[in-house]
Image (cartoon, coloured by chain):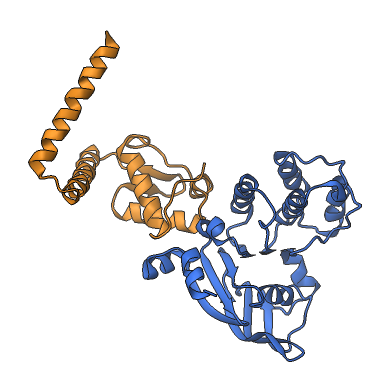
Amino acid sequence: MKPILECSRLTKKYGDFFALSDLSLTLERGQIIGLLGPNGSGKTTLIKLANGLLTPTDGHILINGMTPCPKTKQIVSYLPDCSFINEHMRVQDILSYYTDFFSNFSTERASAMLDALEIDRRSRLSSLSKGTKEKVQLALVMSRDADLYILDEPIGGVDPAARDFILKTILTNYREDAAVLISTHLIADIENVLDRVLFLRNGQLALNATVDDIRTEYGKSVDALFREVFKC
Amino acid sequence: MPWDLNNDRPIYLQLMERIQHDIISGVYQPGDKLPSVRDLAVEAAVNPNTMQKALSELERCGLVHSQRTSGRFITDDTEKLRRMKSELASEHIFSFLDQMRNLGFSDTETLEMIQQTLDKKEGTNNETDS
């Protein structure tokens, strides 16, 4: 099986600024990977390149051996870092919208999650709080039977109890041959569910290691190591 | 309820210790079937691969064994479990004695204090009984 995501000498420039420079890495299936780095380190740029929303300045990025295209969008379930659904839609309409759009979307799974979160299907997205909106969007994204889930800041706006629910949702919903890439600043909250972490700094890979290797080698948590490496 | 894990030690080691403790203290009985890796991982709120690693290590120590297709089972070697239980007990005693020595108590003093505490506790227990 081909690696689910592969970058080779990937570079993205905005004008004179290198958002990513010469980034090479391979992500295997069956892992939950944390994408970590300070603001402006290139996390969202990498995610947008993986989803075909940006094109590389140089180098390439492959999803399951293919450059991002409609075929890769079929196997990648993506949660952007900002609201991506028309705010005037009702939750029930968004459900049928997703059912129409994605053949691998499970309406039952999404309904079960929305019920567990006690979200009223008749409410319009615009009437929901920031955290509830995020929950709805995450439930949709995790209800697709994808090979790669890319979650850009999925737990930023939700309360700690919902955070536990969301992590549980991620743990119970991804298939064993799928991979999950999560970008976040809340490292301590998600550290235990990760296999591996990637540290980005100035558009380059500063570290690529498993959580337990980091703890064995440095005798500290990923969160503590991050604070040390990126101390301001 | 996620398991209580600390921040500076490898997660799989802590999972091993927790399950080992559950086995020794009788939460799981000898010969019991363990929940699946996925269920244990969700319960503990940890990565399934990390849970898998912890269980493989426990298998290597002979505390659990896997039966192809039907899952993982706790060892029914009660002698082994008894031995591990007393090993764990002496670890606790040694670490307690270390702490007491750090506070400046000799082992004899510590022993006396333990006896006093037990006597006092017995006294209050009797009072509540009557």
Residue A65 in sight:
no
Looking at the image, which residue is at 16% across and 33% down? B114
How many numbered discs, if any?
Answer: 0
Residue B17 x %, y %: 34, 49
Figure chain in orange = B
**Residue placed farthest to the front in the image?**
B104
Looking at the image, which residue is at 64% across and 52% down? A173
Residue B24 x %, y %: 30, 39
**Residue placed farthest to the top in the image?**
B130
Give above or below for B87 relative to A34: above
Residue A194 in sight:
yes
- The quadrant in which the N terminus of chain A is found is bottom right
**Residue placed farthest to the right in the image?**
A88
Displayed quadrant of residue A100: bottom right
Q: Nearer the viewer, residue B125 or B45?
A: B125
Q: Nearer the viewer, residue B61 or B16?
A: B16
- The quadrant in which the C terminus of chain A is found is bottom right
Looking at the image, which residue is at 23% across and 23% down? B121
Residue A130 x %, y %: 77, 52
Looking at the image, which residue is at 76% across and 43% down? A111
Residue A39 x %, y %: 65, 73
Q: Nearer the viewer, residue A190 or A39?
A: A39
Give above or below for A149 relative to A168: below
Q: Decide if residue A86 is on the left or right side of residue B16.
A: right
Q: Decide if residue A224 is on the left or right side of residue B26.
A: right
Figure chain in blue = A
